[in-house]
Amino acid sequence: MIHIYILTLFPQIFEGPFSVGLFQKAVERGLVKLDIRNIRDYTHDKHHTTDDYPYGGGAGMVMKPEPLFEAVEAIKSELTEQGIKDPLVVLLSPQGRLFTQDIARELSTNSHLIFICGQYEGVDERVCEHLATDEISIGDYVLTGGELPAMVVVNAVVRLVPGFLGSPDSLLYESHTAGLLEYPQYTRPPVYREQSVPEVLLSGNHAQIAAWRREQSVLRTMKRRPELLAKANLSQKEKEYIKR
Ligand code: SAM
Protein backbone atom coordinates (compact mmCIF):
# COMPACT_ATOMS: atom_id res chain seq x y z
CA MET A 1 0.00 0.00 0.00
CA ILE A 2 1.34 3.42 -0.93
CA HIS A 3 -0.20 6.71 0.09
CA ILE A 4 0.43 9.55 -2.34
CA TYR A 5 -0.21 13.20 -1.65
CA ILE A 6 -0.16 15.69 -4.50
CA LEU A 7 -0.10 19.43 -3.92
CA THR A 8 -1.38 21.31 -6.94
CA LEU A 9 -3.22 24.42 -8.05
CA PHE A 10 -5.24 22.26 -10.46
CA PRO A 11 -6.59 19.18 -8.66
CA GLN A 12 -9.12 18.53 -11.43
CA ILE A 13 -6.30 17.58 -13.85
CA PHE A 14 -5.76 14.37 -11.88
CA GLU A 15 -9.35 13.15 -12.11
CA GLY A 16 -8.97 11.47 -15.51
CA PRO A 17 -5.70 9.53 -15.43
CA PHE A 18 -6.15 8.19 -11.93
CA SER A 19 -9.70 6.99 -12.42
CA VAL A 20 -9.24 4.52 -15.25
CA GLY A 21 -7.78 1.08 -15.89
CA LEU A 22 -5.29 -0.57 -13.59
CA PHE A 23 -4.86 2.59 -11.56
CA GLN A 24 -8.54 2.76 -10.70
CA LYS A 25 -8.49 -0.93 -9.75
CA ALA A 26 -5.47 -0.37 -7.51
CA VAL A 27 -7.27 2.45 -5.74
CA GLU A 28 -10.40 0.31 -5.33
CA ARG A 29 -8.33 -2.58 -3.97
CA GLY A 30 -6.64 -0.27 -1.47
CA LEU A 31 -3.15 -0.68 -2.95
CA VAL A 32 -2.91 3.03 -3.62
CA LYS A 33 -4.39 5.92 -1.75
CA LEU A 34 -4.41 9.28 -3.49
CA ASP A 35 -4.83 12.54 -1.68
CA ILE A 36 -4.89 15.47 -4.11
CA ARG A 37 -4.80 18.77 -2.27
CA ASN A 38 -5.35 22.27 -3.57
CA ILE A 39 -2.50 24.56 -2.58
CA ARG A 40 -5.02 27.43 -2.41
CA ASP A 41 -6.61 25.77 0.62
CA TYR A 42 -3.46 26.69 2.53
CA THR A 43 -3.68 30.45 1.90
CA HIS A 44 -5.13 32.96 4.34
CA ASP A 45 -5.99 36.04 2.26
CA LYS A 46 -9.35 36.54 0.63
CA HIS A 47 -7.95 36.09 -2.90
CA HIS A 48 -6.19 32.82 -1.99
CA THR A 49 -2.94 34.14 -3.40
CA THR A 50 -0.36 31.51 -4.22
CA ASP A 51 2.08 33.48 -6.40
CA ASP A 52 3.84 36.82 -6.46
CA TYR A 53 6.28 38.87 -8.51
CA PRO A 54 9.90 37.73 -8.55
CA TYR A 55 12.32 39.73 -6.44
CA GLY A 56 14.85 41.41 -8.71
CA GLY A 57 12.32 41.70 -11.54
CA GLY A 58 11.90 39.51 -14.59
CA ALA A 59 9.10 37.72 -16.37
CA GLY A 60 6.30 35.73 -14.80
CA MET A 61 5.24 34.89 -11.28
CA VAL A 62 6.80 32.76 -8.60
CA MET A 63 4.90 30.44 -6.27
CA LYS A 64 4.95 31.75 -2.73
CA PRO A 65 6.56 29.64 -0.03
CA GLU A 66 3.92 29.99 2.73
CA PRO A 67 1.06 27.88 1.26
CA LEU A 68 3.49 25.15 0.21
CA PHE A 69 5.19 24.98 3.61
CA GLU A 70 1.81 24.98 5.36
CA ALA A 71 0.39 22.28 3.10
CA VAL A 72 3.36 19.97 3.62
CA GLU A 73 3.40 20.65 7.34
CA ALA A 74 -0.32 19.85 7.60
CA ILE A 75 0.23 16.49 5.89
CA LYS A 76 3.28 15.78 8.02
CA SER A 77 1.43 16.43 11.24
CA GLU A 78 -1.39 14.09 10.13
CA LEU A 79 1.25 11.48 9.41
CA THR A 80 3.02 12.00 12.73
CA GLU A 81 -0.27 11.17 14.46
CA GLN A 82 -0.21 7.86 12.57
CA GLY A 83 3.37 7.26 13.66
CA ILE A 84 4.87 8.07 10.26
CA LYS A 85 7.89 10.32 10.29
CA ASP A 86 9.86 12.15 7.61
CA PRO A 87 7.95 11.31 4.42
CA LEU A 88 9.78 12.17 1.21
CA VAL A 89 8.74 15.49 -0.28
CA VAL A 90 9.33 15.48 -4.03
CA LEU A 91 9.32 18.73 -5.95
CA LEU A 92 8.72 18.30 -9.67
CA SER A 93 11.22 20.55 -11.40
CA PRO A 94 13.05 20.71 -14.74
CA GLN A 95 16.16 21.29 -12.62
CA GLY A 96 15.79 18.05 -10.65
CA ARG A 97 17.55 14.73 -11.10
CA LEU A 98 16.42 12.98 -14.24
CA PHE A 99 13.67 10.44 -13.57
CA THR A 100 14.54 6.81 -14.33
CA GLN A 101 13.18 3.35 -13.57
CA ASP A 102 15.76 3.08 -10.77
CA ILE A 103 14.33 6.20 -9.14
CA ALA A 104 10.79 4.83 -9.60
CA ARG A 105 11.90 1.66 -7.80
CA GLU A 106 13.55 3.68 -5.05
CA LEU A 107 10.39 5.79 -4.50
CA SER A 108 8.09 2.76 -4.62
CA THR A 109 9.65 1.40 -1.41
CA ASN A 110 8.13 4.32 0.55
CA SER A 111 4.74 4.02 2.18
CA HIS A 112 4.03 7.76 1.91
CA LEU A 113 5.12 10.28 -0.71
CA ILE A 114 4.33 13.96 -1.06
CA PHE A 115 4.60 15.61 -4.49
CA ILE A 116 4.66 19.35 -5.08
CA CYS A 117 3.61 20.62 -8.52
CA GLY A 118 5.00 23.99 -9.51
CA GLN A 119 3.42 26.43 -11.97
CA TYR A 120 4.38 29.76 -13.58
CA GLU A 121 8.12 30.46 -13.21
CA GLY A 122 8.39 27.78 -10.55
CA VAL A 123 8.55 27.89 -6.76
CA ASP A 124 10.36 30.16 -4.33
CA GLU A 125 13.87 28.74 -3.85
CA ARG A 126 13.28 28.28 -0.10
CA VAL A 127 10.86 25.48 -1.00
CA CYS A 128 13.63 23.70 -2.91
CA GLU A 129 16.18 24.25 -0.16
CA HIS A 130 14.19 23.73 3.02
CA LEU A 131 10.99 21.84 2.22
CA ALA A 132 11.62 19.41 -0.63
CA THR A 133 13.76 16.38 0.11
CA ASP A 134 14.12 15.55 -3.58
CA GLU A 135 13.72 17.31 -6.93
CA ILE A 136 12.77 15.27 -9.96
CA SER A 137 12.69 16.20 -13.63
CA ILE A 138 10.95 14.00 -16.20
CA GLY A 139 13.14 15.22 -19.05
CA ASP A 140 15.22 18.02 -20.41
CA TYR A 141 12.34 20.20 -21.53
CA VAL A 142 10.07 22.66 -19.77
CA LEU A 143 6.36 22.11 -19.21
CA THR A 144 3.92 24.69 -17.90
CA GLY A 145 3.35 22.88 -14.63
CA GLY A 146 4.35 19.97 -12.44
CA GLU A 147 1.02 18.16 -12.82
CA LEU A 148 1.93 16.07 -15.89
CA PRO A 149 5.36 15.23 -14.44
CA ALA A 150 3.67 14.20 -11.16
CA MET A 151 1.34 11.89 -13.10
CA VAL A 152 4.28 10.36 -14.93
CA VAL A 153 6.29 9.79 -11.76
CA VAL A 154 3.31 8.53 -9.75
CA ASN A 155 2.29 6.17 -12.54
CA ALA A 156 5.78 4.66 -12.83
CA VAL A 157 6.07 4.34 -9.05
CA VAL A 158 2.65 2.88 -8.38
CA ARG A 159 2.87 0.12 -11.00
CA LEU A 160 5.85 -1.22 -9.05
CA VAL A 161 3.81 -1.59 -5.86
CA PRO A 162 3.40 -5.34 -5.22
CA GLY A 163 -0.01 -6.49 -6.46
CA PHE A 164 -0.54 -3.61 -8.88
CA LEU A 165 0.20 -5.68 -11.99
CA GLY A 166 -1.70 -8.91 -12.47
CA SER A 167 1.53 -10.85 -12.93
CA PRO A 168 4.76 -9.72 -11.26
CA ASP A 169 6.55 -11.41 -14.20
CA SER A 170 5.52 -8.41 -16.32
CA LEU A 171 8.20 -6.44 -14.51
CA LEU A 172 10.97 -9.00 -14.93
CA TYR A 173 11.95 -8.45 -18.54
CA GLU A 174 10.43 -5.11 -19.34
CA SER A 175 12.53 -2.22 -20.59
CA HIS A 176 14.86 -0.62 -18.05
CA THR A 177 14.40 -3.31 -15.40
CA ALA A 178 17.74 -5.01 -15.98
CA GLY A 179 19.38 -2.28 -18.02
CA LEU A 180 18.05 -3.64 -21.33
CA LEU A 181 15.13 -2.78 -23.56
CA GLU A 182 12.43 -5.42 -23.79
CA TYR A 183 12.37 -7.91 -26.68
CA PRO A 184 9.78 -7.46 -29.47
CA GLN A 185 6.28 -8.67 -28.63
CA TYR A 186 3.74 -10.24 -30.98
CA THR A 187 0.17 -11.43 -30.68
CA ARG A 188 -2.35 -13.09 -32.99
CA PRO A 189 -2.76 -13.33 -35.97
CA PRO A 190 0.44 -15.24 -36.88
CA VAL A 191 0.49 -13.59 -40.31
CA TYR A 192 -0.82 -10.08 -40.91
CA ARG A 193 -0.51 -8.38 -44.31
CA GLU A 194 2.15 -10.92 -45.25
CA GLN A 195 4.19 -10.08 -42.17
CA SER A 196 4.87 -13.17 -40.08
CA VAL A 197 5.52 -13.58 -36.40
CA PRO A 198 9.06 -15.02 -35.87
CA GLU A 199 8.78 -18.78 -36.10
CA VAL A 200 10.55 -19.47 -32.83
CA LEU A 201 7.67 -17.83 -30.90
CA LEU A 202 5.23 -20.34 -32.38
CA SER A 203 7.51 -23.31 -31.68
CA GLY A 204 6.37 -23.94 -28.10
CA ASN A 205 10.03 -24.51 -27.18
CA HIS A 206 10.39 -22.38 -24.05
CA ALA A 207 14.18 -22.59 -23.86
CA GLN A 208 14.55 -21.44 -27.47
CA ILE A 209 12.00 -18.68 -26.97
CA ALA A 210 13.83 -17.41 -23.87
CA ALA A 211 17.18 -17.46 -25.73
CA TRP A 212 15.69 -15.61 -28.71
CA ARG A 213 14.09 -13.00 -26.48
CA ARG A 214 17.31 -12.41 -24.58
CA GLU A 215 19.26 -12.03 -27.83
CA GLN A 216 16.66 -9.61 -29.23
CA SER A 217 16.74 -7.63 -26.03
CA VAL A 218 20.52 -7.21 -26.20
CA LEU A 219 20.46 -6.46 -29.94
CA ARG A 220 17.69 -3.93 -29.62
CA THR A 221 19.42 -2.15 -26.74
CA MET A 222 22.66 -2.12 -28.71
CA LYS A 223 20.94 -0.53 -31.70
CA ARG A 224 18.64 1.91 -29.94
CA ARG A 225 20.23 2.77 -26.60
CA PRO A 226 23.84 1.56 -26.60
CA GLU A 227 24.68 3.69 -23.56
CA LEU A 228 22.41 1.46 -21.44
CA LEU A 229 24.61 -1.59 -22.02
CA ALA A 230 27.32 -0.28 -19.73
CA LYS A 231 25.01 -0.90 -16.75
CA ALA A 232 23.34 -4.09 -18.01
CA ASN A 233 24.05 -7.47 -16.49
CA LEU A 234 25.52 -9.30 -19.49
CA SER A 235 27.15 -12.72 -19.80
CA GLN A 236 30.73 -12.99 -21.04
CA LYS A 237 29.39 -14.42 -24.30
CA GLU A 238 27.05 -11.46 -24.76
CA LYS A 239 29.83 -8.98 -24.04
CA GLU A 240 32.05 -10.59 -26.68
CA TYR A 241 29.15 -10.67 -29.13
CA ILE A 242 28.53 -6.95 -28.62
CA LYS A 243 32.23 -6.17 -29.07
CA ARG A 244 32.24 -8.03 -32.39
N1 SAM B 1 11.44 28.72 -14.61
C1 SAM B 1 11.68 27.31 -14.42
C2 SAM B 1 13.06 26.95 -14.97
O1 SAM B 1 13.48 27.56 -15.93
O2 SAM B 1 13.68 26.02 -14.43
C3 SAM B 1 10.62 26.50 -15.13
C4 SAM B 1 9.29 26.57 -14.47
S1 SAM B 1 8.08 25.57 -15.26
C5 SAM B 1 7.45 26.66 -16.47
C6 SAM B 1 6.79 25.49 -14.08
C7 SAM B 1 6.72 24.21 -13.30
O3 SAM B 1 6.50 23.12 -14.16
C8 SAM B 1 7.95 23.85 -12.49
O4 SAM B 1 7.97 24.49 -11.24
C9 SAM B 1 7.80 22.34 -12.35
O5 SAM B 1 6.98 21.99 -11.26
C10 SAM B 1 7.08 21.94 -13.64
N2 SAM B 1 7.97 21.38 -14.67
C11 SAM B 1 8.22 21.91 -15.87
N3 SAM B 1 9.02 21.14 -16.60
C12 SAM B 1 9.29 20.06 -15.84
C13 SAM B 1 10.08 18.89 -16.03
N4 SAM B 1 10.76 18.68 -17.16
N5 SAM B 1 10.12 17.97 -15.04
C14 SAM B 1 9.46 18.18 -13.89
N6 SAM B 1 8.70 19.28 -13.64
C15 SAM B 1 8.61 20.21 -14.60
Image (cartoon, rainbow, N blue to C red):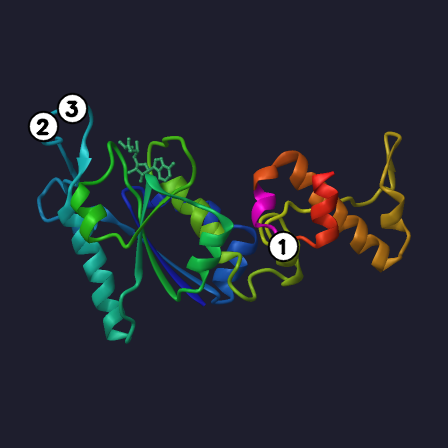
Is 95 displayed left or right of 14 in the figure?
A: left
Q: Of tags 3 and 1, which is closer to the observer?
A: 1
User: What amino acid is found at the position of numbered circle 2 in the picture?
Assistant: Gly
Secondary structure of the residue carrying numbered label 2: loop
Main secondary structure type of the part rendered in magenta = helix
The residue indicated by pointer 2 is: 56
Q: Which is more N-terminal, label 1 or label 3?
A: 3
Residue 131 pos. (x, y %): 21, 53
Q: Are marks 3 and 2 in contact (CB under 8 Å)?
A: yes
In the image, 177 versus 50, the foreground residue is: 177
Q: Quadrant of residue 85?
A: bottom left
User: What amino acid is found at the position of numbered circle 3 in the picture?
Assistant: Gly
> What's the CA distance linking mark 1 and mark 2?
50 Å
Residue 6 pos. (x, y %): 33, 52
In the image, 177 versus 89, the foreground residue is: 177
Residue 97 pos. (x, y %): 37, 44
The residue indicated by pointer 1 is: 233
Task: Judge whether 242 appears above or below 34 on screen.
Answer: above
Q: Which residues are magenta?
A: 228-233
The residue indicated by pointer 3 is: 58
Q: Which is more N-terminal, label 2 or label 1?
A: 2
Q: Residues within 10 Å of mark 1 (few under 14, many from 20)?
A: few
Is 127 displayed left or right of 180 in the figure?
A: left
Secondary structure of the residue carrying numbered label 1: loop
Residue at image point 36% right, 42% down: 147
Residue at image point 28% right, 40% down: 118
In the image, 228 versus 3, the foreground residue is: 228
Residue at image point 16% right, 55% down: 70
Count of numbered badges drawn on the protein? 3
> What's the CA distance linking mark 3 and mark 1?
49 Å
